Structure formats: C-alpha cells, structure tokens
Amino acid sequence: MSGANLHLLWTAGAFVVMLLVIGFYCILVSRNLIRILIGLEILAKAITLSIIAVGYATKNTALSQALAITVIIIEVFVIAIAAGLVINIYQKHDSLSTENLENLKG
Amino acid sequence: MPFLVVLVLNLVNTPGVRRAATGVGIAWTLVQLTWLLVPQTRFTALDSGILGIDFGSLFAVDGLSLVLLISASLVGLVTLISGLATVPDPKARFSFANLVLLILAGLNGLVMVRDLFSLYVYIEVVAVASFILISLDRDKLALEGAFKYLVLSASASMLMLLSIAAILLVSGSTSFVTVHSILQQVPHRGLVAAAMALFVVAAFIKGGLVPFHGWLPDAYSSAPLSVSVLLAGIVTKTAGVYTAMRIVTSVFGFTPMIRSLVLFIGTVSIIFGALAALNQKDFRRMLAYSSISQMGYIIVALGCGTFYGLAGALFHLFNHAVSKSQLFVNAAAVEQQTGSRDMTKLGGLASRMPVTGGTSVVALLSIAGIPPLAGFWSKLVIIIALWQSGHHNYALIAVVASTITLGYFLLLQRRMFFGKTPPELEGIREARTGLLVPAVLLSAVAIALGIAFPVAINWFVRLPSDILNMVAH
Amino acid sequence: MTWSLDIVLLMALAVTALWAVMATRLIYAALGLAFASIALAVVMFRMGSPYAAVIELSVCAGLITAIFISVISLAKHETVAEIESRMKRRWKKYAPLPLVAAAVGVALSLVAKHPRSMPQPLAETDVRKVFWHMRQADLIGQIIIVLVGAFGIVVLFKSWRKK
C-alpha cells in the first residue's frame, strides 16, 4: 500500500463528512418534501464515496465496487418509493410543504 | 429458504390465483412454521445447495436466528389471517399478501446471513416493503407515517453503511467471522470505536428506541390494521433488536462502551415508553409506546452481557412478538367494529365482544408480567439476569416500570372492556373470524408457554448456547 | 501532483451538492444532484472503480434525476412572487450551510492523522466477476427488492379506487 493511496483516503474522508453534514442539514432544515429526498440522495453519495475510497485505499476495488453498486441499486428503490409517497401526499394535500406532515401528534 | 419463499410468489396473473393469494400465503407460513419446529427437517434444507449456489456459507441458522425465524413465521401467519378480515378489496389483498410474503422472505434472509453488508441489504428489503405496506390504502395519515419512517430509516441505513465502510477499512472484509477476529486484534480506539457505536445507534434508530423513536408511534397507529400487526410484531424487532444482538454477540463483542450505551438507551426506553403510554388516548398509539418500553427491556437484558441476559432477551422478544401482535389484532377488531380508536369513548366491550375481550386480557397480563403467563417468566429472567450481573439499580427500575405498566393496563382493561357501555356502542357485534382466529391462537401460545415454563425456559436457554461462547469474554 | 486533480473533483462534488441543497428552484436542485453524480463518477473512475463509476453515472445521473424531474414536474409551478418571498426566508436558513461545511472540511484536514498500518489486502481481488461468487446473498436480496418495488409501483401509482 503506497502512501499516496492513503493520503487521498483521508482527504476523501473529509469530503465524506462534509457531504454528510450537507445532507443531514438539508433533511433537517428543509420544508419541502422533495428537498428532503435530495438530502437523502446526497447522503447516499457520501456513503458511495466512502466505500469506494476505502476500496481504493486497501486495494480491494473489486469488493468495494460490488458493495457500492449494490448500495446504489437499493437506493434507487428507496428513492423511487419515496417519490411515490411524495406524489401521493401531493395529491392529497395539493402541496409539498412539510407542514402537512404535522398531523400525527402525541 | 428465503429463496423458496420468493419462488412461491408465482405471480400468475389469472383472477383465480389472485384471489387465492392470501390463502397461499397462509399455507406457506404454516409450512415454514412446522418446518422450523420439527427438529428433523430443520437443518437439512439449509445445507443443501440449490441451483449450484452453496447456501451453507452465506446463510446459517443458530439459536438466535431460530427464535426469530419462528417469531417471523408466526406473526406472518397471523397477519395474513387477519388480512382476510381487514383488507376488503381483493386487488389490494393480492398486493398485501405478496408484500407480506416478501417481507417474510426478507426477514428470513436477515436473520440468516453471516455478513454485515448482506445484513444491510436484507434490512433494506424489509424496510422498503414496509413503507409500501404502510401506505397500502393511501390514507393521508398513513402516507405521512410512511414518509417519516422512510426518512429516518434511510438515514439510519446511511449511518450503518458508513460504519461498514470504516470496518471494511480496518478489517478488509465484511463477514462476521472475519471482522470478529480482526477486531480482537485491533485496538478499539478512535475510528473503530466510532464505527461500532455508529452501527449500534443505527440499529437502535431502526428499532425505535429512545431517543430515536420519533417515527414509531406515527407509523404504528396510522398503518392499515393488519400491517400494524406485522410491524409491531416482528419488523421493528428484527431490524433493530436482532441486528443489535447479532452484532454485539457475534461481531463486536461486549466492550464496556457498548455495554453502557446499550444499558443506558435500554433503560431510558423502558421508562419513557411506559410513561408515554400512560398519556395516550388512542389505543394503537398507546400500544406503540408500550412496544418501545418492552424493547427497552430486551435491550437492557442484552446489555447484561450474561448468559441469562441473552436468554431472557430472546424469550421476551418472542413473548412480545406473540402478545403485542395479538393486542394489535384486538385493536383492529375493536376499531373495525366500533369505528373508534379513542379509549376514553369505549367501554364495556367484553359483553359484546367476548373473545376479543378475553384474549386481550391474556395479552395485557402477559406483557405486564403476571404469572402464570409467559411474559412473567421472561421478565423474571431479565430482572434476575440484571441483578446477578451487578446492575442492581437497573433491575429496580425494571421492576418499578413493570409495576406501573401493570397498574395502567389493568385500569385500561377494566374501563374498556368491563365498564359501562356508552349508548352509541350498544349494537356492536363480535369481530369477524379473520380477527378472532389469530387472537385465540396467540393467546393459546402465551398461555401454553407460561404454564409449561420449565420447558420454555430450558428451550430458550439452550438455544443461544452456541453463540454464547463469544459472550463469555 | 497526480492527486490534486482529485481534490478539484471532490470540491466540485461538494459544491454541486451544496448547490443542490440551496437552489431556489427545485429543478435546479435536481440538476445540481445530477452534476454531483457526474463528479462522483469521475472520482470513482480515478480511484480504480470503473464499473461502479458507470453504474453511478447511468443510475444516479440518469435514472434518479429522471425520477426527480418527473416528480417535480407533477407539482404545480410557483408564481414569481411566491418564489421571491420564499427566497428571502430561505436565505437566512441556508446561509450558514456552506460556512459550516467548509469549516468541517478544514478542521478535518488539519486533524487527519497519518496513515496507520492496515492489514494485508485480501488475495482474491482483481477480476470483479470473481466477486459475484461471494456476494450471492446480496444478489438474492436484490431480486427480492425488485419484486417489492414492482408491488410498490402497483400500490402507489395505480389508482384502483375512484377518489
């Protein structure tokens, strides 16, 4: 393992954390349902980056690619279902605001 | 085995087959249940390879998995039967049955895989199917519950994957065995410790433990009736509690940090769940908070780190699956017949709905921990385990919370089922068969396990023994 | 020197992600996401993961962006006045974000430890195809999720009840 590989790993790691912050911030602060999904997608990118970076650093690109691809495919389904939910919510409330999601209390 | 479940979903598109889908599902869960309970057939199916794929290295069944497999089959069976009564539209029922079977396949896979990443894959399978099931009838509140659940669950998955990436970095592999041995050699500082904590936290989010429980009451109370049974009875438990159990016993080992984390969150969940349940007027929401509390018990038992702790946890997990599912079935019956979920408005139902009333008494007593029902024994084991391992104050808290729960449940029971009947509820009748059969079945299990408790305790203590050589560190 | 390009690419990734979060119009946000996917794909390619890069491109930059755009177009369009009033409120909410993100990045780069020793990489690397012999459990899981997705589409997108 060369030192160059590892150094990039830590740099990539910093970016992973940045993306995580961006993603979580987006989910927490946003008032629009679709933007929440965007935040979720950004988190997914952070994770994909982290898996690939780890694979690169340990020279185990085959395994990390397999894992990353699986994650991407699963995320597609999650986002697709989420989009379906959002569309249905929109049809019921005629709005994409998160204020509509305050109905369940307690 | 999950492969077979998938194959069973032969989605032939003729109307005749569509209508039979629920029946097929019920038949399959019965098959799976007997398969698991009869020792001879239990393990043979898993060692053989099918289609050239060597299953033995990917999936394995040990005591922990077995308990969950049985619970999953049982709850699946119950859900499908109750679905007959609560999902009127045949087209919806087709999707319902298929999705329940798919969740069962996912759960089977979840408890049988021997690899961290595969664990994630199957957790997601179950999660996605749950989202869909929750929004089956596309009710406004249901969609809201499903969405919140989705966002929190997906966030937790991300954390889990991040942890897996870190572990991959340190150990070069994701399989349980490899990671476990590597983690023994690597010092648990910094990155490794953070990864382990992260994974456990992610599991707790999915399991609805405090303070990550935000999505749970909403999802449980707004989902369609039968889906709540499935969710409460098995999905949350497996995705959250089983995952935590598995990684702590087989992968991470019982480091002090993990132990205190688990104990703390468990205790907080016990107290918070119990107190919050007292405040509820909606029957299903109350049950949801009670579930949070009971899961706290299971987690606390896990946190003991002892043999008895784990046995108690498993036993309680099973009991809770049985009794909580049953309570949700009862709730479905009540809601369907009276059209209301508000407990303050209900009363004197026992005279009108004797079976529902009787079985709910059994379930409530079991959860609250009254002998000779099964719940009493599992709680007893947990409290003894806590005491024995030196966590005296935790044991005391567990006892106190249990008493509070008991008192409240008894009051509730009295008011809802044995009080006076308000005038508008005069004419209601007993629930439909589809909701009675599961209730009776589950009550029978609770009673039988309770009475035969030496056998039961023996069974639950013997089963985890094969993985507990790792616990005794 | 060879990896300063990577840093540029990673910055592009972060910036496009930031843009996706902060853009006022949803369509721009979706585009930001697509560009972020492209940046990520190039990074992955440079990190020796060509297959993953291709999948990321086709799936994320393609399919998911398509999903987003179709969802966005189903929602009604806001009037210009609404957009402007929303912009002012949002600015206060989102302004801290780039600062926070940059601060985190800088802090981490200062803290980053020197590489520690790691265990030997596994012997069975190299050909990716070899790997699918080890990940069959995941494959089965993916098949199940495809079936689940099919039902999801039926449940969520087909209207069998007249509302």
Image (cartoon, coloured by chain):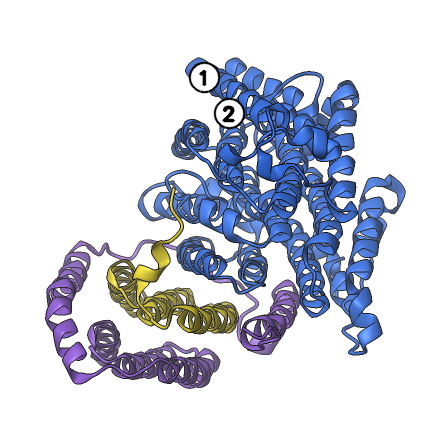
Chain colours: A yellow, B blue, C purple
> Can residue B187 be seen at all in this image of the molecule?
yes
Query: Gap between marks 1 and 2, in whole Å?
Result: 8 Å
Do the residues bearing badges 1 and 2 touch, measured as CB atoms within 8 Å? yes
Identity, as a three-letter code, of the amino acid under mark 1: His
| Total numbered labels | 2
Residue occupied by mark 2: B304
Q: In the image shown, does C50 or B272 lie closer to the viewer?
A: B272
Dot 1 and dot 2 within a common chain = yes
Residue occupied by mark 1: B391
Q: In the image shown, does B268 or C92 lie closer to the viewer?
A: C92
Determine the residue positioned at 62% across, 27% down. Answer: B364
Left-right relation of A70 to A41 = right
Left-right relation of C99 to B441 = left
**Position above or below: B399 against A92:** above
**Position above or below: C149 against B133:** below
- Image quadrant assignment for residue B435: top right
* Quadrant of the frame with the N terminus of chain B: bottom right
| Residue A106, numbered circle | none
Left-right relation of B422 to C60 = right
Identity, as a three-letter code, of the amino acid under mark 2: Cys
Label 1 crowd bin: few (<14), some (14–19), many (20+), radius 10 Å: some
Q: In the image shown, does A93 or A22 lie closer to the viewer?
A: A93
Label 2 crowd bin: few (<14), some (14–19), many (20+), radius 10 Å: many
Determine the residue positioned at 14% across, 61% down. Answer: C106
> Can residue B290 be seen at all in this image of the molecule?
no
- The outermost residue toward the right is B40
Determine the residue positioned at 42% across, 64% down. Answer: A58
Determine the residue positioned at 60% across, 68% down. Answer: C145
Left-right relation of A33 to B204 = left
Chain for disc number 1: B
Secondary element under disc 2, as helix, strand or loop, is helix
Chain for disc number 2: B
